[in-house]
Amino acid sequence: MAGRSCYRIVVVLVFLLGGLLGCGRAWALGDEPRAGETLTQYLTPEILQAIFPGADGIREVEGTPPSAAVYKSSQLLGYVFSTWDVTQSRGFSNRPIVLLVGVSHAGRITGVKLVHHTEPIGILGLHDEDFFRFAEQFKDYDIKNGVDVVKELTSSPLGKGTFSQRAMPGAATTVKVDAVARATTSSVLMSDAVVRGARVIARSRGILPAATVHPARLDIDGFQPVDWPTLEATGAIGHLHLTYHDVLEKLRQHGAIRIKGGDAIADSTDVFLDLYIALATPAGIGINLLDKILYDQYSAGRGIDDQMLLITANSSRSVIDTSSDQQNTILPIELVQRDRTIRISNRQIKALPFIHAKGAPELTERALVFLSNGDDFEPTQPFEVRLLVAGEVADGRNTFADFTLPYRLPDKYLLAPPPASAEASSGLAWRAIWQARQGEIAVLSGALLVLTGILLMRNWISRRPRLHRALRVGFLTWTLGWLGWYAGAQLTVVQVISWIHTVVTDFRWDYLLADPLITILLGFTIVGLFLWGRAAYCGWLCPFGALQELVSEAARRLRVPQVRIPVDLHGRLVVGKYILFVALVGASFVSWDLAMAGTEIEPFKAAIVLRFMTEWPMVVYALALVAASLFIERFYCRFACPLGGGLAIFGKLRMVNWLKRHPECGSRCRFCESVCPVGAIRRDGRINMNECFFCLDCQVTYYDDHTCPPMVWRRKRLEQQGVPVSASGPGAGGR
């Protein structure tokens, strides 16, 4: 049995090695394009004529960000650039999308050509022509306007129509482009890459300042990752802190006896409101608060003169309520700049479900306020946010007290110094990313130390069933809640394949270190392969695995019948994940599109990263796998997870056998087969570490002299001999 198993592993490794050596020609399909080189790589005379009809000359690619000047009879027509070189544009598969875009000296897009993408279109029934036609819609688009990506409704009960993929509130001038059917996410990402890239090039080449004054002085494009405390300390985030004493004291000056709608709260130092504001138009602020994808969507959906102001609050009462059905409801917040007051209505507001900034405080409300050019708002000049709080006088009439929060954009977000975009050519600034996420790194590092302690102290813990159960459920809850749904740190087979390509093609440490939590998890998992095989990650650190096991735990407590798969059938089913992993790795060196289509079998993005807030087919698929765990524990992990299959293959490097067995296991006694919830114990009593998740249930049983038959026999013999026995307690073995 062991010989056949080793033979299978050897065959798999030979297959992988053959794929790496035999498919050298296809390596480039999985490579990321080199920043600054895609324009010269893909630009042909035919594409140039399609983007700039009649052009008869082009200069060398130059400048930061890079572009090439295009001429006709020595007259400058504009500039052509690559979205990858300017914005590092990526698609739904998180792989590069390269579009070549022309921008005229008048600030209009002259043409767009999609030249490289790896979107998983095959499984959606799409063709490259669908994306090519989508890109052609941007011809003659004025980059000062916003773009709204819309999807056609062909089966709506209200009749044929469209709905916005952004739902941007109060957008002044927007151009509508039709999304590619069944690929709306890819459409939005491509649109944002075109629009934001064109604006970056236009600002850097002096095109936009001639057409607009306000944004020209902002450093719209410069970006460095920082956390919330840093933004607040530098003044990029303004903070107004009010206590009940502050509010009541000012209201009393206007004759009020209490806060309107308030209870009999005493004049106290309890917190009434924490209000935070930030100008989110500069990328250095907006991307850190919203993340890059959302920032690109919100900014590309608005005109070039529009501004984005983030307003968040932590209070028991709403100050930025967006629930009103009336579109022009005036909110109790207004902006004051010089002698002008700008009232804010709910039609200008986009509610946000959460803030992406690291280290953000607890917030009860989050919203973006969109200010159009007609609001006459100058973002580079100081302004105040004025909050109105209503109070009640003795006769029941209302009165108001106002509180102001002054705000001035820090100088670092103005155009002097110029945008720091050298990062694209010199490599990713991973050190700054790690520094900005020190808190998360500390939490994860502490959790890994705790897990290491659990795994090393397994014998001591296994002798204490209640402690074992508490640690197991508690750690899995942390893995799902914090590591998965909060931090989004879920390893996937896509990352593993990308890392394999990085190692065998163009090794870049900076890209491997771009996500500190994933990097730390990967390092711990690699070390764990030598000590515990796949079990350290799959059994304890995989958020989707934790979700399945917690669902199984709840199902058993609710007495949901559990399905026990026969040993022979189980042995056949587990092969599926190994086949999937090998097939995906091999396919990635032949066709990246095919490999990415295959990775759709992973439910991690829908269930963990996007927290089930994505397209309904993905949600249904993920929920179906979770539902299967009601009856079969870790159904997906055991039979269909290519990541688990890959880790199990490399887990053969394991050097230590930690789990204990009795001499009677598998011969006189096969009780542990029924204890193991994932069928990892063979008929001969040995534990198949390829399938083991190191839950330690079998070890709890191993030490339980009231459950484990060999231990029961031993206890009874000692009792007959009059030897005192320290029992671990009845009913403590396993589940």
Image: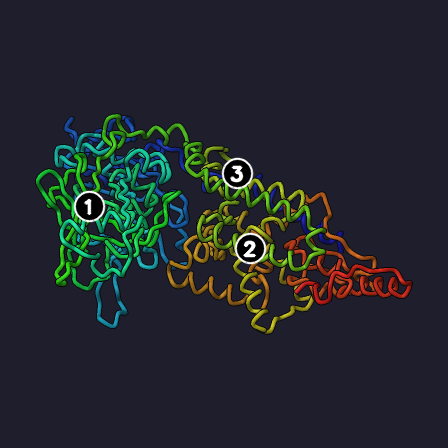
Residue shown at 46% from the left, 51% from the top? 596
Instruction: Determine the CA span between mark 2 and mark 3.
Output: 41 Å
Instruction: Determine the CA span between mark 1 and mark 2.
Output: 46 Å
The residue carrying mark 3 is 24
- Where is residue 445? Give x, y as percent: 54, 41
- Residue positioned most to the left: 339
Viewer-proximal residue among 678 and 19: 678
Residue shown at 60% from the left, 59% from the top? 638
Q: Is residue 225 above or below residue 649?
A: above
Residue type at the position of mark 2:
Leu
Tags 1 and 2 touching, CB below 8 Å: no
Is there any visible trace of residue 84 in the rendered image?
Answer: yes
- Where is residue 395? Give x, y as percent: 12, 63
Image disc number at residue 150 = none
Q: Is residue 445 left or right of residue 170?
A: right
Instruction: Determine the CA span between mark 1 and mark 3.
Output: 66 Å
Counting other residues with Cα less than 10 Å from the Cα at mark 3, is it few (<14), some (14-19), or many (20 or more)?
Answer: few
- Where is residue 49? Give x, y as percent: 23, 38
Counting other residues with Cα less than 10 Å from the Cα at mark 2, is it few (<14), some (14-19), or many (20 or more)?
Answer: many
The residue carrying mark 1 is 403
Residue type at the position of mark 3:
Gly
Tags 2 and 3 touching, CB below 8 Å: no
Q: Is residue 8 above or below residue 193?
A: below
